[in-house]
Image (cartoon, helix red, strand yellow):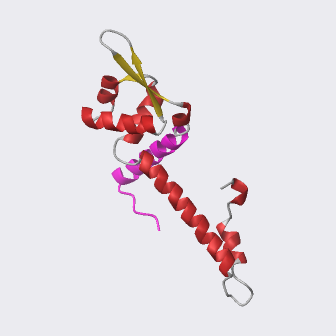
Amino acid sequence: MTTSSLIDKTDVLTSATDKAGVKDNVAFEKLCEDHNHRMLAMRDAMDVLGGKWRLPIVAILSFKGKMRFTEILRSVHGIGAKMLSKELQDLEANRLLTRTVKQTKPITVEYEITEYGKTLIALITEIVNWGMIHREKIMHGEPAEK
């Protein structure tokens, strides 16, 4: 779906209602189709990035650059070696990082964020900013906004 084919929901709702207040089924279905498409895209993103460890792994690699397994293990607090190994495999399968085996004694394995993985840096930055604001609100006991 291209940007030009995305529809503004307010335009659809306005055009979906005729002068008598009856919804135009075609426009309403288009709104639902767009909503479903966006929800599927969000679900896809959450499948790739969801969970407790994936974003922190991508974040640490984006902040620090190339890292060895044990460096990542020490940097992502609370994760176990087996879980880290699984998450790194999943992130590599989704092309967000690369795994390079160096023929040294002993063998060294380095992980690095890919160019595609770097597209997540803005998202990670926004999540970090939101988290800092949220933490401040919660710590200072600010009431929920209406």
The image quadrant that residue 79 belongs to is top left
- For the point 65% across and 68% down, which residue is it? 9
Most distant residue in the top direction: 105
With 24 as the anchor, is 44 left or right in this view? Answer: left
Magenta residues (range): 121-146
- For the point 48% across and 44% down, which residue is it? 129
Task: Out of 125 and 73, give the one closest to the viewer.
Answer: 73
Task: Out of 106 and 76, give the one closest to the viewer.
Answer: 106
On the image, the x and y values in percent for residue 41 come to: 53, 55
Look at the picture and state if 143 lies above or below 17: above
Most distant residue in the bottom direction: 20
Look at the picture and state if 1 lies above or below 103: below
On the image, the x and y values in percent for residue 60 come to: 41, 31
Task: Out of 55 and 102, give the one closest to the viewer.
Answer: 102
On the image, the x and y values in percent for residue 74 come to: 29, 27
Task: Out of 34 and 62, give the one closest to the viewer.
Answer: 34
